[in-house]
């Protein structure tokens, strides 16, 4: 454990001189119960003040546009920020550049309505096969999706797409970028659920865990979709892979591609036991006495100090 922590600090020191871009997962990385929008965008403001760019690379899709873009644009205007900023949703299947007064779509690998319906049908068959029903699902996920279904989504999700999930009492949520199922309460079942989904979905789709609550189904790209998003942003900015620092909390889940760059860091408490080669990214953040999200904040503030 000490080796991992020491190496994490060494890699942070190495990253500082060339750093131009932060690639940030959102939930569990820079946001949690104690770190909400005011804290997140106060951190982003500090990054912008050092003329560094930010790209949020999140599993959120329509909610990323609905929740993250307005405060980001407000910050760009208020501070007259000139460095580029980006939001990638659906685990990187959509990518936008966020300007002060507009949102520019760079690419969109979303799903057509028929593909959403197909993914829902396949996912429900897998859950039925495994004997998983509504009562077995994580309550947090059910509550989240039931709340989503009470909210207005006009302008963010086409009505015919969100209507697909309405009959299922919060068990799943459908939007253009992805189809998301609530995972079972029993965590020991999660890997089996994901493996069964990927087997049933075939080569066209990809199922990955976002956290202990949700599994996301997206279109399978030529490589990991979060990695595609970061590489696209690097290309737009004319940067190389040593000039981005990425952070994520799911190194064995949907952040695997995001955390494949030379200076990638995770705040996962479990990764000590999973990582086979300490010398390869992602590196474990030091300061284990801090909460996982506080570790990310401390690391970022160190990098821009």
Image: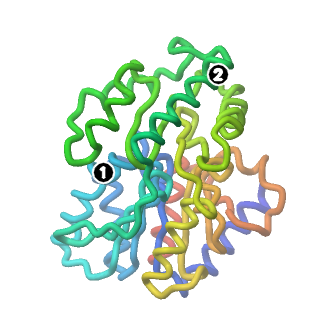
Task: Name the residue rendered at 54%, 82% in the picture.
Answer: 243
Q: Is residue 228 above or below residue 156?
A: below
Q: Position of residue 301 (x, y in %)?
A: 45, 69
> Image quadrant for the N terminus?
bottom right
- Dividing the picture into quadrants, the one containing residue 53 is bottom left
Q: Secondary structure at mark 2?
A: loop
Q: Is residue 194 left or right of residue 117?
A: right
Task: Name the residue rendered at 50%, 62% in the picture.
Answer: 298
Q: Earlier in the sequence, mark 1 or mark 2?
A: 1
Residue underneath mark 2:
186
> Image quadrant for the C terminus?
bottom left
Q: Is residue 189 above or below residue 297?
A: above
Tell me if residue 292 can be seen.
yes
Query: Which numbered circle lies on residue 237?
Result: none
Q: Position of residue 241 (x, y in %)?
A: 59, 80
* Front one among 152 and 52: 152
Tell me if residue 60 can be seen.
no
Q: Secondary structure at mark 1?
A: helix
Task: Name the residue rendered at 45%, 29% in the picture.
Answer: 172
Q: Nearer the viewer, mark 1 or mark 2?
A: 2
Q: Is residue 226 left or right of residue 40?
A: right
Q: Position of residue 3 (x, y in %)?
A: 79, 62
The residue at the far right in this view is 276
Q: Is residue 294 above or below residue 106?
A: above
Q: Position of residue 98 (x, y in %)?
A: 29, 68
Query: Which numbered circle lies on residue 37?
Result: 1
């Amino acid at each position: 454990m000490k080796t991992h922590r020491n190496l994490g600090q060494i890699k942070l020191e190495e990253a500082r001189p060339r750093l131009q871009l932060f690639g940030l997962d959102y939930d569990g990385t820079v946001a949690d119960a104690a770190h909400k929008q005011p804290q997140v965008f106060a951190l982003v403001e500090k990054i912008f003040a050092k003329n560094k760019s930010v790209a949020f690379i999140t599993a959120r899709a329509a909610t990323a546009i609905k929740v993250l873009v307005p405060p980001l644009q407000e910050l760009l205007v208020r501070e007259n920020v000139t460095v580029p900023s980006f939001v990638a949703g659906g685990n990187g299947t959509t990518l936008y550049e966020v300007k002060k007064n507009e949102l520019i779509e760079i690419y969109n690998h979303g799903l057509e309505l028929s593909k959403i319906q197909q993914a829902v049908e396949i996912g429900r068959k897998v859950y039925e096969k495994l004997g998983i029903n509504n009562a077995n699902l994580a309550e947090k996920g059910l509550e989240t999706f039931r709340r989503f279904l009470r909210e207005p989504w006009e302008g963010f999700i086409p009505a015919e797409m969100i209507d697909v999930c309405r009959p299922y009492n919060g068990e799943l949520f459908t939007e253009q970028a992805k189809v998301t199922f609530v995972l079972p309460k029993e965590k020991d079942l999660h890997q089996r659920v994901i493996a069964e989904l990927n087997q049933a979905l075939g080569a066209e789709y990809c199922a990955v865990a976002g956290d202990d609550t949700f599994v996301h189904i997206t279109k399978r790209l030529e490589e990991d979709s979060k990695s595609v998003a970061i590489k696209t942003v690097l290309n737009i900015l004319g940067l190389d892979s040593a000039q981005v620092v990425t952070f994520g909390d799911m190194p064995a889940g949907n952040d695997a591609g995001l955390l494949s760059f030379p200076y990638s860091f995770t705040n996962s408490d479990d990764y000590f036991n999973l990582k086979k080669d300490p010398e390869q990214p992602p590196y474990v953040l030091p300061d284990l006495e801090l909460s996982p999200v506080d570790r990310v904040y401390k690391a970022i503030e160190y990098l821009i100090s």
